[in-house]
Amino acid sequence: MKVTHVLLLFVILGILAACGQVSDRRPADADLRPPQLQAVLSTGPSQLSVQFDEEASLVPDKTSISPPLAVTEITGPGRQIEIRGQTQSPGRLYTLEAEAEDAKGNRASFMADFYGYNGRVPGLLINEFTPQGSGNHPDLVELKALTAGNLGGMVLYQGTPASFDNKIVFPPLEVAEGAFVLVHWKPTGDPAEVNETEDMTASKGFDASDGAWDLWVADGKGLSGNNGVLSLHDRPGGKCLDGVLYSNRTSQSDESYRGFGSAETLARAEELVQAGGWKPAGARVSPEDAVNPDGSTGTRSICRLSHPVDTNSSEDWHIVPTRKASFGAENSDEVYTP
């Protein structure tokens, strides 16, 4: 190799080494990542909690709520920031638009929905349901109000907060003690299927009741017929107020998923138990703990007693005889015999 070629090689290596030294001087722990939003929740009539994965601040002139709510105070910095301002309408859907900044100056804009704080959540039970409905009697769930209150912002899941097929977030609706609320899970698209918030007689769809509040799941395709979970919460992702696990399977039906048939259904059953909405007989929930829907139809609903008992178990439930479904009225205590 010629001397000039050797010298050129050393020059190139020197340049590469120098470039490497320059890149090495960049801090290994440089923070270029903006704060990540984790949750936005109404925590009081005029208070909102905004949660991040790191300490952050909200930029005041970049923070607004629509429909318009005046913002009077923003706490922070912190992982949890409180926004205080004008009183929210219970159960109304709002959108927070804001910009967050961390200690390193990294910023991120975001938009997030939340529901107005409801301080008058009534006691509710899932009281009757048909997961195996028919054309004239589509899948339906009845709730019974044990106390008076407002449904605004409460939510009924087909599933659980972490895993669901669909849900209904209730509009602001005043209910009296003893009132019934019918959630129609398979609407046909008939214009007569209207959500009732002021007039119990306004809706005229299948199985609508003039003696109950009728609400329709806009994207509902029906309930799982043989194997499912229903759970009722005081707000999206909030406290579980009631739940039902139903299945016609057994622990021997499927080795991989404890008999539930899918990882999804097993996870929902476990989440319902963990939330206090269902009590298994043993240490782990199994299909044998569930209400068996076999024998139910569009007119043979699955019911609690007329004076409901709530032990969060299959013992609370029975299937009524043909044409004894009683949506919008007190349940029948008669039991279907195959």
Image (tube, rainbow, N blue to C red):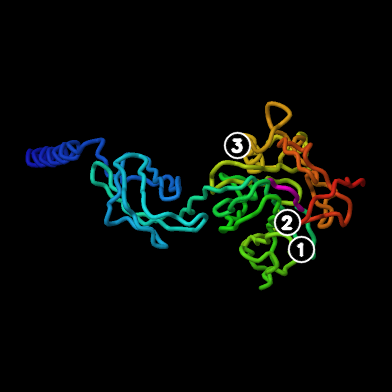
> What is the C-alpha distance between the residues marked 1 and 2?
9 Å
Magenta segment: 125-130
Q: Residue 274 sits in which quadrant?
A: top right
Query: What residue does disc 3 label?
Result: 275
x and y, in percent, of residue 6 in the image = 11, 38
Instruction: Reply above or below: 86 against 10.
Output: below
In-image side of 88 versus 152 (left or right):
left
Q: Which amino acid does label 2 sit on?
A: Leu
Q: Residue 207 carries which label?
A: 1
Q: Residue 250 sits in which quadrant?
A: top right
- Find out whether the residues at labels 3 and 1 contact each other: C-beta distance under 8 Å: no
Answer with mark 1 or mark 2, whichever residue precedes in sequence: 2
Q: Is residue 158 visible?
A: yes
> What is the C-alpha distance between the residues marked 3 and 1?
31 Å
Residue drawn at the location 62% of the way across and 52% of the way down: 165
Residue drawn at the location 75% of the way across and 50% of the way down: 128
Residue drawn at the location 27% of the way across and 51% of the way down: 59
- Which one is nearer the viewer's eye here, 168 or 38? 168
Q: Which amino acid does label 3 sit on?
A: Ala
Instruction: Reply above or below: 27 against 193.
Output: above
